[in-house]
Image (spheres, helix red, strand yellow):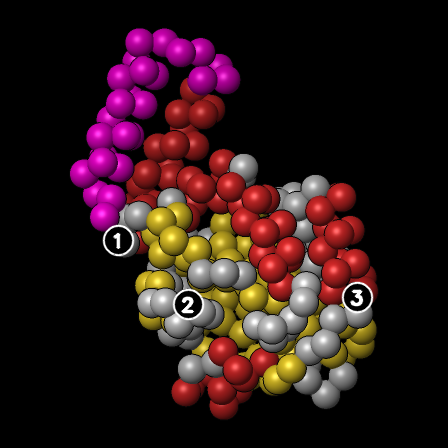
Amino acid sequence: MLQHVPDVLTAEELAEARRLLANASWVDGRVTAGTQAAIVKNNQQLPENAPEIRALRQLVHMALGRNPLFFSTALPSRILPPFFNRYIGQTNHYGFHVDNAMRMMPDGSGYVRADVSATLFLSEPDEYEGGELMIEDTFGRHAFKLKAGSMVVYPSSSVHQVTPVTKGARVACFMFIQSMVRDAEKRRLLYDMDISLAQLRQTVGESEAVVHLTGVYHNLLRLWAE
């Protein structure tokens, strides 16, 4: 499933992230690319030894932890420490590719299964030309160029690309999530039920039926979670 998650970062968090990245040193983005992706990847990335990366990752993790729409969409079990990339000048695009199924932790401590991918936009749309995130799957082909601080969540199995940035700079955070529910269809059913329950609470309150359905949701999650 494909989900737009608006306003993941507050204005203050976004300003802090942009401040930290303003004077950062970037390296070739192919350092985290798989064999297929390395052929079509042409961008820049914040290296693991960057002095800013710990504070940036903590900022993003805190924002994700308080966002109910992100939780409902991804049902995260493990999140690979977020990465940060930039598209600018001659390093300005990332051709169609599929994310690797297994991602090594940056410290080499083990692997995270990539069920869900996410891109958190850190540049405003009018700060660069091009740079759309194009995602193609059973739901068709969709292009995203979101306002800074907003995020798109999508299946890691999707074919996707970032179109060439022809002017300005596109800075973003990207991440890979291992879900508690591996099966995408089951994850979608739980999402639909969770969103419907939230709407019911707003209209009818905590009625007996809503309480019962909430129990069904959690029992299904208990049954399907790994």
Q: CA distance from mark 3 to mark 1?
A: 39 Å
Please name the residue that numbered disc 3 is placed on. 22
Choose mark 2 or mark 1, whichever is in front: 2
Q: Is residue 161 visible?
A: yes
Percent x, y of residue 155: 40, 60
Q: Tell me what residue is drawn at x 50 percent, y 60 percent.
A: 81
| Of pointers 3 and 1, the one earlier in the residue sequence | 3
Q: In the image, 129: left or right of 116?
A: right
- Crowd band around label 2 with a 10 angstrom C-alpha radius: few (<14), some (14–19), many (20+): few
Residue extent of the magenta highlight: 201-226
Tell me the amino acid under the disc marked 3: Ala
Percent x, y of residue 175: 50, 61
Percent x, y of residue 35: 41, 87
Choose mark 3 or mark 1, whichever is in front: 3
Give the quadrant of residue 80.
bottom left
Q: Tell me what residue is drawn at x 39 percent, y 32 percent.
A: 194
Q: Are marks 3 and 2 in contact (CB under 8 Å)?
A: no
| Of pointers 2 and 1, the one earlier in the residue sequence | 2
Percent x, y of residue 75: 38, 45
Magenta segment includes 209: yes
Please name the residue that numbered disc 1 is placed on. 183
Q: CA distance from mark 3 to mark 2?
A: 26 Å
Vertical comparison of 148 with 168: above or below: above
